[in-house]
Amino acid sequence: MRIPAAIFVFLLLASSVFFVQQYFSGRQVLVTSDPAYAVSSAQEHLNVLLVFGVLAAFFFALFIYTALTSRESAKHLAYFLSRDISASKEQFRKFYDLSPVPYVLIDPQGVIERPNKASLRFFGMTEEELRGKNLFSYLQLPDHPERLSLYKERLSRHIPVEQGEILVTKANGVTRWALLSIEDLSTPGDGKHQGLATVVDIHDQKELERIKTEFLSLASHQLRAPLANLKWYMDFLLTRRAESLSGDVLTYINKMYRRNEDMIDLVNTLLNLSRIEMGRVKVDTEHVDLTPLIRGVTEELESAAKDKEITVQTTMSDAFPFETDGKLVRIIIQNLLSNAIRYTPKGGHAEVTLTNNNGQGALIEVVDSGIGIPPEEQDRIFSKLYRASNAKAMEVNGNGIGLYMCKALAESLGGSIEFVSIAGKGTTFRLKLPG
Ligand code: ADP
């Protein structure tokens, strides 16, 4: 469009010059009133008019030509664009169809609009059989049916579903574990609402995990009995035969007793872990007083604290009656306080406080003046087997199971566990239990 605009400016200037020149020439004719001069002047005007006419025709033609050619090139551009778009659409369709990951395009209610080839293989159906069926009619979660309803609701509200474990029933009636994700594919403006569901088969991994967990549970059970026997024999020697044993022997038996206690703790931890993994944590809600329960734990860990010259303080009311599973709460507090002592250098202090969480249940805080948790590692601290770098450097003994277990137990009690920590200064763990 720049050329026609320039031409118009030029024409405007030329015509202005022309008319100004005509005006002065006309005045000249009037002033001289010489007929010969008037004729030659008229001739001159005609010539100028002719040149001007030719120039105007030329630029007019140029203007028409430019307009026509730019329309033509726009047409070409549109053609190439639509060709590229359909080529990339075709590429995307192939990628979707041939991807080894099972994908299904679904509507807001879960009705399957377009399954890809991998999903047909996964379900063991043809496209005609699967199209038009509701995806959720093939999914189940016997232990958590509420999660399935939540996934449906998220789909209808355009909220993605991220990697939920789910059982899928195939055409032959066989069920397999899969990871379900749903992404919202709605395009704003056109009112079309679609979801892209991904169903990844994880059945073999789940099966391996189950076998491993069952083995862990069996092995821990088998180890419990001999360890309990050893404890009983050593207890007997230390309490009933102490006078007949030499000082050296007594020292060794005491050491053996403590090591045996560590093994019993570890076996109990593994047993609890296997229960959590198998979803077999039993919650027995009973009437408990949390004050003596916490005091019991601090007394149990007194000698460990004394060894490191750590003072352990408790801030609680005289009684705190509460409805919860006392055994599970005890395991959590035992883990948190033993960690507080373990990750606090000699001469430090730890504190356990119990309050009613502003009337919303119970809040148990375990505070220490220890090594803290490095900020870049804090988001992994509840992961199974994870140990922070500073903890590994300070204390070689540890398995990274305690906090993972505490979190799972707190959640099975309907509560939560969180922490704040400053590396080098200390950590506060907060266990909240619903009232
Ligand atoms: P473990 O203590 O056997 O290593 P846990 O699961 O109990 O395993 O704890 C996981 C990790 O969390 C620890 O290795 C340590 O890095 C960190 N941690 C837990 N409690 C504390 C604490 N009170 N102070 C500093 N770090 C802690």
Image (tube, helix red, strand yellow):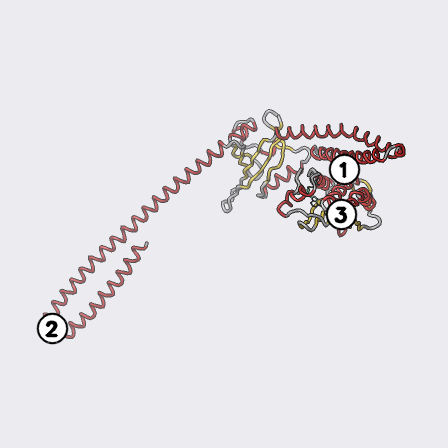
To which quarter of the image does residue 264 belong? top right
Taking the image in four quarters, ligand 1 sits in the one at top right
Q: Mark 3 near mark 1, Cβ–Cβ under 8 Å?
A: no
Question: Residue at the spot x=44%, y=38% of the render?
Answer: 89
How would you rate the neighbour count of disc 2 (Cα within 10 Å): few for under 14, some for 14-19, many for 20 or more? Answer: few
The percent position of residue 224, horizontal first and vertical second, equals 78, 30
Q: CA distance from mark 2 to mark 3?
A: 120 Å
Q: Secondary structure at mark 2?
A: loop
Q: Secondary structure at mark 3?
A: strand
User: In the figure, is residue 324 to the left or right of 111?
Assistant: right
To which quarter of the image does residue 195 belong? top right
Q: Amino acid at mark 3?
A: Ile
Residue 346 visible in image: yes
Q: Amino acid at mark 1?
A: Val
Q: Which residue is mark 1?
A: 283
Disc nearer the start of the sequence (1/2): 2
Q: Residue furthest bottom?
A: 31
Q: Which residue is mark 2?
A: 34
Q: Which residue is mark 3?
A: 364
To which quarter of the image does residue 150 belong? top right
Say which of 425 and 407 sits in front. 425
Q: How many marks?
A: 3
Q: CA distance from mark 3 to mark 1?
A: 19 Å
The percent position of residue 35, horizontal first and vertical second, equals 10, 71
